[in-house]
Amino acid sequence: MAENEKKQSIDDATLEMIAKAGRDEVRVVFDRSAKMKPCPIGAEGSCCSNCAMGPCRIPLPKGRELTPEEEKKRRGVCGATAETIAARNFVRMIAAGAAAHGDHGRKVTEAFIATAKGEAPGYEIVDEQKLLQLALDFGIEIGERSKNEIAIDVGQKAMAEFGKQDGELLFLKRAPLKRQKLWRKLGVTPRGIDREVVEALHRTHMGVDQDYRNLLLQGSRTALSDGWGGSMIATELQDIMFGTPSPVLSQINLGVLREDEVNIIIHGHEPLLAEMMAVVVQDPKMIEYAKSKGAKGINLAGMCCTANEILMRHGVPIAGNFLQQELAIVTGALEAMVVDVQCIMQGISDVAQCYHTRIITTDPRAKIQGASHIEFDELNAAESARAIIKAAIDNFPNRGKNVQIPKEKTDLIAGFSHETINYLLGGVFRASYRPLNDNIINGRIRGVAGVVGCNNPRVTHDMQLDMVKELIKNDVLVLQTGCMAMASAKAGLMLPEAAAKYAGEGLASVCEAVGIPPVLHMGACIDNSRILMAATAMVKDGGLGDDISDLPVVGAAPEWMSEKALSIGQYFVASGVFTVFGVTWPTTGSKEVTDLIFREFEEMYGGMWAFEPDPLKAAHLMIAHIDKKRKALCIDKARERLLYDMEMRRELEAA
Ligand code: BF8
């Protein structure tokens, strides 16, 4: 089906706002993507723009194999082969993604240290138990010291991980021993978070590393420095400062915006400002101020991963995922879109000019032309948050008559941190993954899938639902983060009652016994580190092999678009997880590179990439991989028996 024929979204609120944008003559991402055909040479990874002798474009011929003669001539000006060019591009994308997560982690660490020192009023050390756990992981003395003294040392040790030059990242010790040994053997053990990103950029510079296998090793090392480094540090320190998530009820979709209140959306990734805004919007003085401008109150909602952060810890509602950011403005009911970093489309600035919405940038690293900038100061967080919220309230009287808020909003339960799953499954006194492992071994749960990542207008918005529904129907427990979690939440899959409606009998029986939905929201994209921890906990609880690659566990990002998603995918693969991406695959310009990452990686890491744009077919690739792992663990028979028993039961009931 041609791009302009495909359905733009399966979400009614999104479709309603696309139509309104059309009537208002406002161009949004869906229009721009229909007009802009992706460059086929760049899409397959066959364009090198790493020096000024190029850009060199060496596309594959359409619909036929290369002749040996063409193959020989397929070189950039420097002589770079298709393999080198595809691998360089791939590794650069990983490095950019890892840098984004790492820089998020660093910013949080700075605020964490300031908090521990008492220099950041309004923030505090909330989860003491997690602090002590981290102190033990880092080898920091606890003794009789105060939580703030311990936290200063924890923060400084975490900060040192970014600039460390040798040795191994500290969190790697959390991985199964076998995995750690494998990383050392392959030479992909990350030394320092920044160092791996810098080395990836150096080695992909013109005239440096020109062996695609060697380049891909640095790709793994860089990605691992994200998953077991920058992202994990961000997750852990945020939990200590803001609380480790536990189940919380909230709502999602554009219908959470309110006609009669000042609507503020906080959008981006880092929760430092959002946390403070969640507190300040409740200040009676601010509410009074909003009333003085004619509003009934202040309504704070989130978008993208900042939304996930404040949803997980406070139940702040979510207005939508990545492709809905401009559409929130199109409602005509948004007083301010407050942004921090990452996944913020520059298009919001153009769209906002057609309505009254103020775009407020807050971070010196992420300014947008045409937006107002009110800088957020972590050391004076409440004051900054107040100034930003006041600016939004002041804009309420400017709201026009062209307001249309979709009615769609769905309840969801979020807050499934790794620790919460542990407690829910095992109970507070014997928290463990044992019941999960037992139910995998006895076949009620077939396996576990992490379905994560973005939206991408190249495919139908939120179409990943087909994948998630197929997985749970086949008794696969689904863990989600990022914008994919939001897609499932909008469809009601993150409610306990979804188990009876959508899950297979085995999975439904476990969900009903524990009282959890069949699809668990684990947080923002940096919280994919929680999935690594969950997988490691499953290995450590025993009975499912001695490495992550032995587990019937798979990953997917069916609608990915961001470089961060590639970094996440690569650290999943290098940690031993079979990972399927949809939309497009960025190395198809080189058969060698693609073969390496789709096939040989399995021998190297026990996990490999796959590309399948059809979400149903992708789900079946994942299920097949789960079954392969079950067979290798000799637990495939248990499931057959279980299914046989159920069949017999049905026959008996029928008789
Ligand atoms: O970091 S899922 S579109 S918001 S990149 Fe961006 Fe992708 Fe959404 Fe979360 Ni992750």
Image: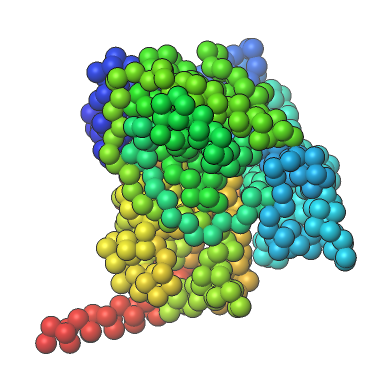
In this view of the protein, which residue sits in the foreground, 601 or 483? 483
At which x and y percent is residue 252? 38, 45
Side of 556 relative to 234 (left or right): left
The part of the image, by quadrant, that contains residue 418 is bottom right
Q: Position of residue 636 (x, y in %)?
A: 41, 75
**Nearer the observer, 291 or 132:** 291
In the picture shown, does residue 321 fall above or below 292?
Answer: below
Regarding residue 632, the answer to whether it shows in the image is no
Please tell me whether residue 53 is drawn above or below residue 637 in the rendered image: above
Q: How many marks?
A: 0
The vertical placement of 321 against 353, above or below, is below
Query: Residue 508 or 557: which is nearer the viewer?
Result: 508
Q: Residue at x 61, y 39 (%)?
A: 276
* Res 602 quadrant in image: bottom right
Q: Which residue is the extreme one toward the left?
A: 655
Which residue corresponds to the image point at 32% horizontal and 63% vertical from the top-left?
497
- Image check: 280 left or right of 610? right
Vertical order, 530 against 18 (above or below):
below
For the question of whether residue 273 can be seen, the reply is yes
| Residue situated in front as seen by the camera: 431 or 129 | 129
Which residue appears at 11% of the width and 87% of the height? 655
In the visual, does 146 lie left or right of 24?
A: right
Task: Look at the image and tell me in which quarter the N terminus lies.
Answer: top left
* Relative image position of residue 27 (x, y in whole percent): 34, 17
Instruction: Please provide percent x and percent y for residue 77.
Output: 61, 16
* Residue located 50% across and 41% down the image: 307
